[in-house]
Amino acid sequence: MASEDSHEGWGGYHLQEIKMETNLPQYLVILCFGLAGFIIGWAMPRGRRFKALQLRFLKGLHNFFADEEEYIQHKAERIKRSIKRKVKGK
């Protein structure tokens, strides 16, 4: 007699189902990303060159957001002026 967990295989043999839970795929992903991060960190320039590169990147990021904020303020002022003109015209 076969148990509920088994099923019939070739030649009438009963194969027991193996129920196994594993976290191997998650561990492999963590290992790969950790290794890639280590290699990238090792390849990054250190010292003055790294600081100069970091400063250049942060300056560019700051200028982008500062310009974007100024652009939005300019647009808001234009909208306020056009609304005032429309209100005066009525």
Image (cartoon, rainbow, N blue to C red):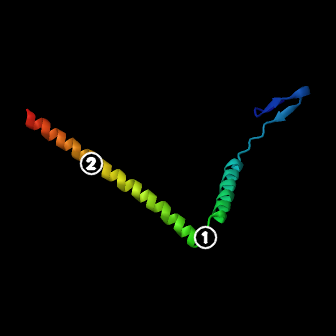
Residue 74: numbered disc: 2
Separation (CA) of disc 1 from disc 2:
41 Å
- Give the crowd class for mark 2: few <14, some 14-19, many >=20 residues within 10 Å: few
- At horizontal 52% and vertical 64% (from top left) the residue drawn is 54
Q: Which of marks 1 and 2 is nearer the N terminus?
A: 1
Residue occupying the point 70% across, 47% down: 25
Residue projecting furthest to the bottom: 47
x%, y% of residue 8? 84, 28
Question: Image height check: is 22 above or below 54?
Answer: above
What residue type is disc 1 on? Arg
Quadrant for the N terminus in the image:
top right
Residue 46 circle label: 1
**Can you give x and y, in whole percent of width and height, for residue 66 in the image?**
36, 56
For label 1, the SS is loop
| Amino acid type at mark 2 | His
Q: Residue furthest right?
A: 11
Q: Compared to 45, does 87 lie above or below?
A: above
